[in-house]
């Protein structure tokens, strides 16, 4: 494949804009499409329409190869392959709605009606099995008057990226997943990826439905692994000397398990994992299979903020000032959707606490009840209780002298990122989530258990 192929990307949000800029950085011409004129204007000015690591740098470097428009027709008629990266929001049943994807496919189809050249359409947005072939393909064929496989190609090829590292993840994936309508369109897309990706990843090709299931299954499996680690963290708090990092480090050496996502801390959040798990449950139940595992994972995950608050409750009275360090659901992003730190803050406010917060990626106020300050120092100096709610590198640098107050301060380290020697400070009561902090009580509980169990088998 030479650089004469032109790409179009429909939907210029965090993933779409990042994909467009990354592809353009490899020397290809890319036309972005978005219904928001402001987004189009910013990209054409060489500016990032959304906050994402290195996005503006990549857009600026691709000047002359990357442009944007609100006109589907212009983009489709002047490109060879279109990535569709539109929002697929959850509906009231937990499934993914195709309302934005359907509109995009209709517009693409109307443009294809005027085009005599073969065109490949690639859906990237997360959808449930059957959505592409039975939901969107009829719209594309109906609007274009053309036949898939003969006049145009259709693939489903989702990305496996994380907010805050979208461009890096897109260019360096663990593998490339292609669900193909036929061999021709799949081969063309695979050839494109081979020229774009930097790490020569494996390319896995399959039917569209298998690819749709693979995407949603991968996310559901990761949430299960995160949740299992969080269950271990809760158990470690209840045994003498318990330390979840010791346990998960050992578990991770088993190649069947691995270390990634096996942390034991707060639960997962963000715009993908929570809803993907619910959608997995929906499609399982609809198809007559079992969705219980995904439903249980979701239930346990949503209960974690309340569990953390129970650890903090003895130290919170009406008027206690609680500092939340990290509002986003993870470092390096301003996204607070399904953020467990927000839920923790809300529950502490219900107990009468005054909430103050700092996040290096968030400057806007979340609400009148939560004061967001501009510096870590300002946040700490006002606090009676400090909750480290995401593992941002800035928080790892906290030392004894970071806590300037003369009175006793409670430090709740949800990710155990601080040096444990901080517990030796006379004015700091350190609570590392996932570790035993009351060995005496935990020893007593286990001793009583096994005394009773021995008695059951005849030993006094």
Image (tube, rainbow, N blue to C red):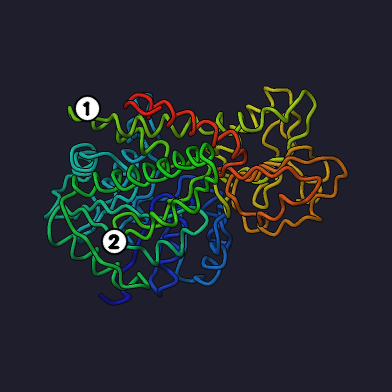
- Quarter of the picture containing the N terminus is bottom left
> Farthest residue toward the right?
406
Q: Secondary structure at mark 2?
A: strand
User: Is any part of residue 157 visible from this angle?
Assistant: yes
Q: Residues within 10 Å of mark 1 (few under 14, many from 20)?
A: few
Numbered badge on residue 219: none
Numbered badge on residue 286: 1
Name the foreground residue: 164 vs 102. Answer: 164
- Residue 246: give x, y in percent of width and height: 49, 54
> Farthest residue toward the bottom?
2
User: Is any part of residue 269 visible from this angle?
Assistant: no
- Residue 316: give x, y in percent of width and height: 73, 28
Residue topped by disc 2: 176
Seen in the picture, residue 53 relative to 369 is either above or below; the reply is below
Name the foreground residue: 317 vs 126. Answer: 317
Q: In the rendered picture of this protein, how many numbered marks are placed on residues?
A: 2
- Residue 314: give x, y in percent of width and height: 69, 28
Seen in the picture, residue 168 relative to 300 is either above or below; the reply is below
Seen in the picture, residue 358 relative to 52 is either above or below; the reply is above
Q: Secondary structure at mark 1?
A: helix
- Residue 271: give x, y in percent of width and height: 46, 41
| Residue at x 48%, y 34% (from the top left corner) | 446
Q: CA distance from mark 2 to mark 1?
A: 28 Å
* Rendering quarter of residue 456: top left
């Amino acid at each position: 494949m030479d650089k004469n192929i032109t790409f179009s990307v429909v939907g210029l949000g965090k993933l779409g804009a990042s994909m467009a800029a990354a592809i353009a950085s490899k020397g290809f011409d890319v036309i972005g499409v978005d219904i928001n004129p402001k987004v189009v204007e910013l990209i054409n000015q060489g500016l990032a329409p959304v906050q994402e690591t290195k996005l503006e740098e990549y857009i600026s470097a691709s000047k002359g190869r990357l442009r944007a428009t609100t006109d589907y027709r212009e983009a489709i008629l002047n490109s060879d392959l279109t990535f569709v990266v539109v929002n697929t929001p959850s509906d009231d049943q937990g499934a993914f709605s195709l309302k934005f994807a359907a509109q995009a496919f209709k517009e693409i189809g109307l443009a294809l009606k005027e085009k005599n050249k073969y065109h490949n359409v690639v859906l990237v947005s997360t959808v449930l099995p059957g959505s592409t072939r039975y939901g969107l393909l009829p719209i594309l064929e109906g609007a274009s008057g053309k036949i898939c496989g003969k006049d145009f190609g259709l693939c489903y090829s989702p990305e496996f990226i994380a907010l805050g590292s979208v461009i890096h993840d897109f260019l360096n994936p663990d593998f490339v997943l292609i669900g193909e309508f036929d061999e021709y369109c799949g081969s063309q897309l695979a050839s494109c990826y081979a020229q774009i990706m930097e790490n020569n990843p494996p390319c896995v090709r399959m039917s569209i439905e298998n690819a749709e299931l693979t995407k949603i299954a991968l996310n559901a499996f990761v949430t299960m692994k995160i949740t299992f680690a969080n269950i271990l963290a809760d158990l470690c708090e209840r045994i003498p000397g318990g330390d979840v990092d010791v346990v998960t480090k050992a578990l991770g050496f088993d190649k069947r398990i691995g270390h990634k996502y096996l942390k034991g801390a707060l639960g997962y959040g963000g715009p993908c994992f929570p809803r993907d798990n619910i959608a997995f449950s929906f499609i399982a139940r609809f198809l007559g299979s079992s969705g219980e595992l995904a439903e249980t994972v979701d239930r346990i995950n949503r209960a974690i903020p309340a569990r953390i608050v129970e650890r903090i409750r003895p130290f919170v009275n009406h008027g206690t000032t609680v500092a939340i360090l990290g509002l986003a659901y993870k470092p390096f992003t301003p996204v607070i959707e399904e953020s467990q730190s927000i839920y923790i803050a809300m529950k502490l406010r219900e107990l009468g606490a005054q909430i103050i917060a700092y996040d290096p990626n968030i400057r806007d106020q979340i609400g009148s009840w939560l004061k967001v300050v501009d510096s870590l120092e300002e946040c700490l100096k006002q606090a009676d209780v400090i909750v480290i709610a995401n593992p941002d590198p800035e928080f790892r640098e906290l030392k004894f002298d970071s806590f300037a107050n003369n009175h006793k301060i409670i430090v709740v380290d949800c990710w155990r990122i601080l040096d444990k020697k901080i517990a030796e400070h006379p004015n700091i009561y350190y609570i590392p989530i996932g570790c035993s902090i009351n060995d005496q009580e935990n020893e007593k509980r286990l001793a009583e258990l096994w005394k009773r169990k021995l008695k059951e088998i005849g030993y006094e």
